Amino acid sequence: MKKYSGVTRYVIITTAMALLITVIVSLSFGSFFAKSREYAVQDGESIAARNAAMIEDNLSYGLDALNMAVQAVDYMHIQKLSMEAVQKYIEVQAESLVNSTDGVFTGLYMYSGGSIYDGMKRDIPEWLDAETRIWYLAAVANPGKIVMTGPYPDAVSDGKECLTLSVSIPEENTVIAADFLVEAIQSIVDSTNINGAGFCMIQNRNGSIIAHVDRSLIGKSTYNLGSKDMVELTDEILNGTEKQYSLMRNIDGTNYYLFINRISDRWLMTMAVTRKDLFAPLTGTLYRYVFVSLIVYIGVLIFGINSVRVKEREAEARCSAEKLSEELSQALEEANSASVAKSRFLFNMSHDIRTPMNAISGFVDLAYAHADDPEIVKKYLEKAKGSEQYLLGMISDVLDMSRIESGNVKINETAVNLYKKTDNLIEIIRQAASKKNIDVQFDTRGVFEPYVYMDETHCGRVAVNILGNAVKYTPDGGSVLFSISQRPSAIEGHVYTTFEAKDNGIGMSNEFLDHIYEIFSRENNTTISKIEGTGLGMSIVKSLIDLMGGSINVESAPGEGTTVSVKLDLRIAPVFDEEEEEEDTTAVKKEIEGMRVLLVEDNELNREIAGEILKERGVLVDEAMDGSEAVAIMVAAAPCYYDLILMDVQMPVMDGYEATRQIRNLENAATAATPIVAMTANAFDEDRKQAYEAGMNGHIPKPINIAELECTLRKYSKRETPFTIR
């Protein structure tokens, strides 16, 4: 057998390796190039969508401002308020609209009774006759709908080209309008970085060009540009229904990638990039790829020839392998720790969920056993309701932790009375404390400013959690002191408030105090200690306090008890009347009796419950089991046949969002305008926002709150004519 020298052997080996790398590079390049093309198209879609969203956001501000102004002015007219009050309201709304859109909207104004009330208090030319202006005529011709007119030179803004949103209040012979600068739209189109022969334009539903990178085309129609390909493209995108999509077309001999976005169902934004320009970066990438492959080939060859450094390379390789082994071991240890924490959490959750479920089942069984005694049945059902609320609270803890970590929790401050909130807290904690014969004392003697602004929901969660922990971890016969004290704040109009819960319970070790705010952390196993909990409470408390700009401190020792102090700098609120009037249930039922509601729900049990609740209040109910069935019913229904649609979201065949969009696009305007309210277990703020974006009018979370359902029914019980933006 022929033997080779060391250098020759390494040359042969490294050459073979280089050839192998070259083959692998050649085989993988096809896949790489296809993926890169996909990324290039995605980048184009992202740029187009971002620019369309900028315009749509500003347009939405104007639409919202007009809707609010219509309701407010109509209310003022009903209340017979002075036109000075109306003028003041228009000024406030105009300033808010201009500031919110950074000057894209130039103001808000109203024409009523022969006079113009301008929110920006601009000088109105004496020759200006509002009743001859196109924005006035269009609004009057379409009562109750927001219409858009223009572009045209504005009479009071130095002749700048603008578009006008306007809406009429027929009963008051009043038109409210807001001007939208065309230059603001054009600047976004101009900022779109289109290389080569590409273009970007915005056109209305008639094909007229509102903005274009080639300003000479503004005001023209794409139907009149002398291009058969452009006419066919215009027909296709104007007749489309998708919110956002991309396609490839040949226009006058050039291949374009077109990225199309609909803006508030009023405009179409089209960004066109030639295929050559879109994939130009890939050509450079190809050359770099070949160059790098060549360098790798030469480098590997040189490495093989340089046999002197082989042993050094081997030593480095062994060192790298050891380091990699350490990193893998550390990663494995971290993964195992996460798995253990997850398993412990799921084990504890399984136990803690069964506890309230057992209570609910037991109380329901007891209620059945005493069905002939309404008072006892009511007592057991109230207790079952309490266990249900505890179970919902436990589920909310898990979901809230997820929302906090994703940054979706917002602070909403309202005026509250600390004395009253303390009374409510006593009622919440009394039952758990009495079962263990724990003496709970509340001390509010240190409060001198009881009326403050605070996030009532989040502060309540914090107080219930720390006080609940105090009761939970204090043995039978122990004591808990909850106190509120105040001292002057360094900020004028604020008061520095301390909430403190002190118990003589089992306490915590110093080692655990270092981890008390970590998720799923508990010093003792739930099942062994027989104490319910998810290990999320203090994590949520700490996160909420941080969001509210406060601080928390925990002092504890085993066998000596725990003291938890929460400090918040609260804004002082004015004294307010807290008397509440009870709702006349008979009047409520009379108000909603006879309404006709379409209930869309795929779950048979949920459909039966909701249907019975509605029927008990005199509501006429028709049912659909999914979104497609609901759309079919609405297509066949007479205009204004249904007063309201209660729509579930997650359903088979067609979900509630898609069903709502299809109903909103029905040919009959009155049927399409039927109010739709989501009634779903998707209960977060982002779910509520998604419902509104789909075209719904409201959102009711499950489990159903009957008072909230009645309020929603009353809101739509007096609907006489549809009011919508088409």
Image (cartoon, rainbow, N blue to C red):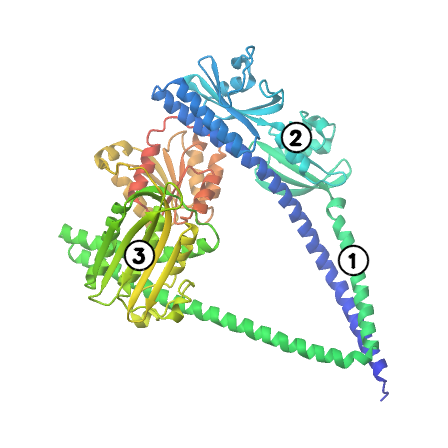
Q: Is residue 678 above or below residue 184?
A: below
Q: Amino acid at mark 3?
A: Glu
Which class describes the residues within 10 Å of circle 1: few (<14), some (14-19), or many (20+)?
few
> In front: 560, or 199?
560
Q: Is residue 294 visible?
A: yes
Label 3 residue SS: strand
Q: Is residue 10 above or below residue 520?
A: below
Q: Residue furthest top?
A: 127
* Sequence order check, earlier mark of 1 and 3: 1
Of the numbered discs in the image, which one, if any, rests on residue 662?
none
> In front: 697, or 480?
480
Real-space Cα distance between discs 1 and 3?
65 Å
Direction from residue 661 to residue 642 in the image, left or right: left
In the picture of the structure, the residue carrying the numbered disc 1 is 288
In the picture of the structure, the residue carrying the numbered disc 2 is 211
Q: Is residue 170 above or below residue 657?
A: above
Real-space Cα distance between discs 2 and 1?
39 Å
The image shows residue 722 at horizontal and vertical percentages of 42, 28
Label 2 residue SS: strand
Which class describes the residues within 10 Å of circle 2: few (<14), some (14-19), or many (20+)?
many
Label 1 residue SS: helix
